[in-house]
Image: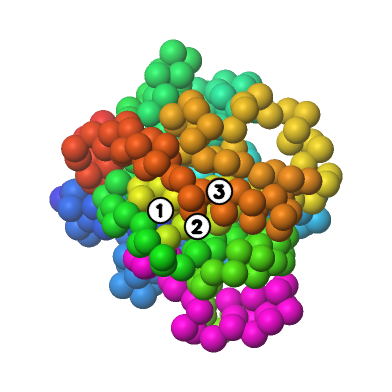
């Protein structure tokens, strides 16, 4: 009798929840009777036909040194709860998605506690950005994981050189984000982020920028935040009420947009793959910014620029992330965005290996781990 697989999936952010849902969907092809337990959000709940997470995404999504520090007691409590559960349940596979600091601690514990030695395999989907800061993290990845699945093309080679099993299958956004191109005379898309800390910093600035540009605009709501809650968030940080006609759901709803103002993160990549010219902005607490500025070793923050190794999209960080600077950049981009459009085509070629990335990941895990 074939043993039923027990699989634990952990995603601490909205983008990771999407990847988790895809991994679960395709893993069912190999393990149709597998038992899944997860920490995450709506995406994985839907993939498991309504099954609720042990811990919801909204309880997990934290960002920034100061922001995380304020919630250390809660994070440690969650971590302790998870370790007790995994010790008793003894899964065949632990799938850690992004959420890097929490996940590497979990991977270390799974190794030291003997869980991996007893047969549990552990993979990390989305490589920590060790090439940007804290390069020593590769040591932990080598010691505490069975494989790392990178989403950026250059990461696979770097990880492999460190002795880490790190196959590259392309970026999953290729499958779910279809090119539409910008609509001449269309609206301005505002993507202020998916975490509460980002929204509180970006919504006031994005709103002021949109008013300055004197162009119709729509907010792009992350799918894991309900419409009513998002409207309340917009009202709180912009000082204005918005109705559902001024909000679209997810980056795939950008049809009709001419240009976008985007918070740094996965959305910059998805906006580029849609073919919408963009300006990238990011603002955080001063404490977080100063620490990041001291440690970070790369010249760009947007995934588009990092992958292409070129300043294709304009980036405005911290002090420069203000409505005047963003307005001028958007106005200039409206007049000439030919370089971005050409670069977007190069970006798609780098990320598309003519296969379904998450299907390939699921098959690789089933056949090799």
Left or right of 253? Residue 357 is left
The answer, for residue 289, to whether it is visible in the render is: yes
Magenta span contains residue 250? yes
Kind of element beneath mark 2? strand
Kind of element beneath mark 3? helix
Residue 20, image x, y percentages: 39, 54
First in sequence: mark 3 vs mark 1 = 1
Q: Nearer the viewer, mark 3 or mark 2?
A: 3
The answer to whether marks 1 and 2 mark residues whose Cβ atoms lie closer than 8 Å is yes
Residue 350, image x, y percentages: 32, 31
First in sequence: mark 3 vs mark 2 = 2
Residue at 58%, 59% in the rendered image: 193
- Within-10-Å neighbours for mark 1: few <14, some 14–19, many 20+: many
Residue at 69%, 82% in the rendered image: 240
**Residue on which the image places disc 2:** 260
Would you place residue 41 above or below residue 309 in this image?
below
Q: Which residues are magenta?
A: 230-257
Residue 28, image x, y percentages: 23, 55
**Residue on which the image places disc 3:** 332
Farthest residue to the front: give it: 335
- Checking the image for residue 276, the label placed there is 1
Magenta span contains residue 266? no
Kind of element beneath mark 1? loop
């Amino acid at each position: 009798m074939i043993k039923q697989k027990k699989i634990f999936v952990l995603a601490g952010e909205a983008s990771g929840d999407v990847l988790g849902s895809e991994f679960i969907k395709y893993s069912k092809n190999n393990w149709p009777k597998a038992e899944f337990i997860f920490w995450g959000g709506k995406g994985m709940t839907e993939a498991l036909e309504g099954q609720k997470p042990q811990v919801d995404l909204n309880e997990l999504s934290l960002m920034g040194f100061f922001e995380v520090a304020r919630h250390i007691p809660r994070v440690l409590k969650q971590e302790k709860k998870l370790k007790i559960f995994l010790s008793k349940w003894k899964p065949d596979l632990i799938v850690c998605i992004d959420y890097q600091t929490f996940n590497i601690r979990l991977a270390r514990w799974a190794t030291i506690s003997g869980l991996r030695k007893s047969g549990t395999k552990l993979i990390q989907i989305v490589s920590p950005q060790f090439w940007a800061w804290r390069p020593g993290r590769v040591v932990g990845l080598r010691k505490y994981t069975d494989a790392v699945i990178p989403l950026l093309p250059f990461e696979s080679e770097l990880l492999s050189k460190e002795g880490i099993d790190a196959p590259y299958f392309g970026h999953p956004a290729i499958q779910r984000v279809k090119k539409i191109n910008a609509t001449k005379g269309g609206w301005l898309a505002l993507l202020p982020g998916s975490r509460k800390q980002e929204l509180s910093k970006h919504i006031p600035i994005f709103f002021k920028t949109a008013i300055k540009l004197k162009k119709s605009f729509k907010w792009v709501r992350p799918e894991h935040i309900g419409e009513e809650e998002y409207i309340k968030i917009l009202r709180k940080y912009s000082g204005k009420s918005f109705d559902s006609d001024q909000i679209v759901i997810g980056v795939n709803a950008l049809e009709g947009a001419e240009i976008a103002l985007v918070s740094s993160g996965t959305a910059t990549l998805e906006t580029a793959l849609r073919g919408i010219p963009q300006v990238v902005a990011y603002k955080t607490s001063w404490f977080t910014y100063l620490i990041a500025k001291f440690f970070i070793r790369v010249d760009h923050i947007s995934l588009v620029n990092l992958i292409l190794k070129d300043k294709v999209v304009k980036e405005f960080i911290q002090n420069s992330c203000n409505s005047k600077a963003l307005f001028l950049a958007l106005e200039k981009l409206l007049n000439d965005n030919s370089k971005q459009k050409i670069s977007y085509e190069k970006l798609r070629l780098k990320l598309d290996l003519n296969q379904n990335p998450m299907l390939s990941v699921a098959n690789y895990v089933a056949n090799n781990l």
